[in-house]
Amino acid sequence: MKNSFTEENYLKAIYKLSERDELVTTTDIATMLDIRAATVTDMLKKLAVKKLIRYERYKGLSLTEKGRAIGVKIIRKHRLWELFLVQKMKFRWDEVHEIAEQLEHIQSDELINRLDEMLGFPKADPHGDPIPDKNGVFGKTRTIPLNQVKPKVVSVVAGVIENSNTFLQYLDKIGIAIGDKITIHAIEAYDQSHRISVNQGKEVFISESVAKNILVVGK
Amino acid sequence: MKNSFTEENYLKAIYKLSERDELVTTTDIATMLDIRAATVTDMLKKLAVKKLIRYERYKGLSLTEKGRAIGVKIIRKHRLWELFLVQKMKFRWDEVHEIAEQLEHIQSDELINRLDEMLGFPKADPHGDPIPDKNGVFGKTRTIPLNQVKPKVVSVVAGVIENSNTFLQYLDKIGIAIGDKITIHAIEAYDQSHRISVNQGKEVFISESVAKNILVVGK
DNA sequence: CATAATATTTAGACTAATCTAACATTTTTA
DNA sequence: TAAAAATGTTAGATTAGTCTAAATATTATG
Ligand SMILES: [Mn+2]
Ligand SMILES: [Mn+2]
Ligand SMILES: [Mn+2]
Ligand SMILES: [Mn+2]
């Protein structure tokens, strides 16, 4: 009944990949987990025997309900722990991912549900990623990348797409955090860079790629 | 530099055994970890190569400073997590050990030190076991088993020796908790059973073995 | 102190998770 | 559509951690 850390990490990776495309490939998993495709093939056979995935040689794989449930649960735990670390332990949003990679494997439904309750049944983690409820259901989020917002419209930062520490630290440096109100003043036609202001404060320039990686609450 | 969960569990077990006797034996470790002596021998060789223990074939082993530091650190983490679970997450003292067995392996000095701070740099876990500080130093505790206390003297419960869930639940049932004031009214000469009262309340009978497993603050 | 009992180690095997190298299949492209 | 490229699988190794059975060393005892 119990899965190893390794199996949990595979199922989490497969779940994330299947958000884009139901049918997941061996190489995608290998890339995401930074291991060799041959290793993945072996594990896929094991997961298929356990009925956690549907797998056909050379054809790719998809999660079964059972496999999805485990993948989603790991994601739920990861995100709840991240929020706990930020809200209760005063870590910065760029410090919590590595620790949550470990904490996500702690086995205790009671603990994770109390954590959920203690945090007020939150809908999103410190990076704006949605947290599924105890039944594995995600609330619907209506966020769009900042670069799709029209000039003059005030939008509220809800999260980020890129999750790297360097990106998060860059946002800290230029003073953009979740909940901030952003107004786009102008978009440079040449390179799509944005001139914006944060919370009606002084203006900041961000590149197109930064704008694409900031999520705001959609209208 | 990083040790596996398994190595950490060995070092924790060895540390606990060496509290009784500096020189630890293969069989003691096997018994404590519930694995075969042959398995232990293999691991001892590995720990010796890593200079975490001093080991001589057939002669037993002892911890090096390096090994002791790791063992103590795991114990520190275990006990801080247990206290966190009781104080912050409202678990009962008989529910926390299994979860702490997992949490003790989370690698983050920052996290454990913040946990320590959040809990007010506690000196003991929910079962009264001492918590070493971040330098691996234990405060001195002056506790004695209840059966060594003289009748009529009021003593304060500081912890337990036996840590099993059944024992902890038994204490809950008869209404004995850490911090309670206990007065011994009489000790039965035949079987050393104790007639006591808790917080000046109504009288309770406990067997000698129970009295031996309750620690009170020594005079 | 010789032998019996106990403790410990060695030898050989197994499983999970990983790798590299070689082979097979599918997809792309000229 | 045939060859080339990309993708995926198999075969054979390796490491960590475990086991059982057999061998060896230490300790206890008649
Ligand atoms: Mn994360
Ligand atoms: Mn993980
Ligand atoms: Mn414990
Ligand atoms: Mn442990």
Image (cartoon, coloured by chain):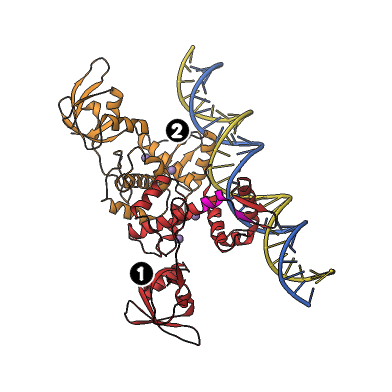
Chain colours: A orange, B red, C yellow, D blue
B12, A195: nearer the viewer: B12
| Label 2: chain letter | A
In the visual, does A183 lie left or right of B159? left
Tag shown at residue B179: 1
Residue under the point 30% across and 34% down = A160
Res B40 → quadrant = bottom right
| Label 1: chain letter | B
For the C terminus of chain B, the quadrant is bottom left
Q: How many marks?
A: 2
A67, B153: nearer the viewer: B153
Q: Is residue B151 above or below residue B7?
A: below
Can see residue A148?
A: yes
Where is mark 2, residue-wise? A28
In the visual, does B195 lie left or right of A204? right
Element type where label 1 sits in the image: loop
Residue under the point 70% across and 54% down = B57
Image position, residue A28 (x, y; %): 45, 33
Residue under the point 31% across and 80% down = B201
Image position, residue A92 (x, y; %): 32, 40
Q: Which residues are magenta?
A: B61-71
Magenta stretch secondary structure, dominant: helix
The image quadrant in which ligand 2 is located: top left
